[in-house]
Image (tube, rainbow, N blue to C red):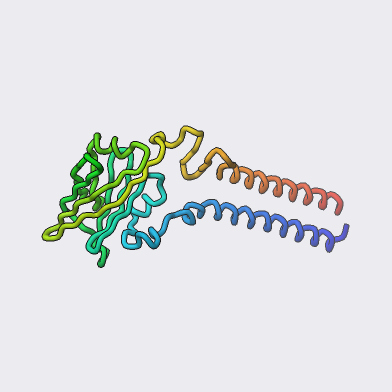
């Protein structure tokens, strides 16, 4: 076998390995950026003014949610495991309403919402009130806001579905970020391992081809 033939085979083998390496890198980049593509954005046409990190995170969760607005205020509420959390803004300016007096009514139940300075939200943690809201069905809410000289009533409906476990992992779901799997597909970790095996096989094949080429040239 002449040197030109060996050179062509070597170039073809190098090109094939480079292509596999590039494909593997691209695949890994896609996996790593999947979380970014799935990140929630604005609330949409019904909640543009409350597009904050906290509210955006809530929009991606399965927590029951309610939106309400008036000429003065708007709010987004989420029912979580241990509280009913509400973000309240001024409708016209999107300015957060801080340290106001807030009460929430649902039927005959009533509770006062505490203001969290660290999160800027208002939360109801009354056990009896939360138990009533967690019952499956529609729960009309009336929120009374007293901010300085201003006061207003905001009304909305919180829709609560069938009871679920707190963790949501009873069906074999994994939520560790690096190897997310919902039980209906192959996890990202498995794909990474497959790509690594493919690269190892390509490297071994190239080494064997190189040895054969050297043996034929002798």
* Residue 10 location, quadrant: bottom right
Please report the residue visible at 21 percent of the width from the left and 58 percent of the height from the top.
Answer: 97
Horizontal side, residue 147 vs residue 193: left or right: left
* Residue 102 % position (x, y): 18, 50
Give the residue furthest to the left. 149
Give the residue furthest to the right. 1
* Residue 134 % position (x, y): 33, 38
Q: Front-most of 139 and 88?
A: 139
Horizontal side, residue 209 vs residue 193: left or right: right
Q: Which quarter of the rendered picture does the N terminus lie within? A: bottom right
State the count of labels.
0
Horizontal side, residue 195 vs residue 215: left or right: left
Give the residue furthest to the front. 107
Please report the residue visible at 40 percent of the width from the left and 40 percent of the height from the top.
Answer: 161
Relative to 97, does residue 133 appear above or below in the rendering? above
* Residue 88 location, quadrant: bottom left
* Residue 51 % position (x, y): 34, 59
Please report the residue visible at 46 percent of the width from the left and 41 percent of the height from the top.
Answer: 176
Q: Front-most of 135 and 61?
A: 135
Relative to 167, does residue 178 appear above or below in the rendering? below
* Residue 96 % position (x, y): 23, 59
Q: Front-most of 149 and 170?
A: 149
């Amino acid at each position: 076998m002449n040197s030109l033939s060996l050179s062509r085979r070597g170039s073809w083998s190098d090109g094939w390995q480079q292509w596999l390496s590039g494909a593997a890198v691209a695949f890994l980049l896609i996996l790593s950026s999947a979380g970014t593509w799935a990140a929630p954005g604005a609330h949409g046409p019904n909640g543009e003014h409350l597009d904050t990190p906290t509210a955006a995170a809530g929009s991606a969760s399965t927590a029951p949610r309610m939106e309400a607005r008036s000429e003065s205020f708007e709010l987004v509420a989420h029912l979580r495991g241990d509280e009913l959390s509400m973000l309240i803004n001024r409708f016209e300016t999107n300015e957060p309403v801080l340290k106001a007096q807030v009460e929430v009514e649902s039927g005959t139940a009533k509770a006062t919402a505490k203001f969290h300075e660290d999160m800027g939200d208002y939360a109801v943690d009354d056990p009896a009130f939360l138990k009533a809201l967690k019952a499956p069905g529609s729960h009309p809410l009336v929120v009374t806001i007293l901010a300085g000289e201003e006061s207003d009533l905001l009304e909305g409906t919180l829709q609560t579905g069938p009871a679920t476990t707190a963790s949501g992992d009873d069906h074999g779901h994994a939520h560790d970020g690096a190897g997310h799997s919902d039980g209906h597909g192959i996890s990202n970790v498995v794909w990474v391992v497959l790509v690594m095996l493919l690269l190892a096989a390509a490297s071994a094949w190239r080494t064997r081809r190189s040895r054969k080429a050297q043996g034929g040239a002798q």
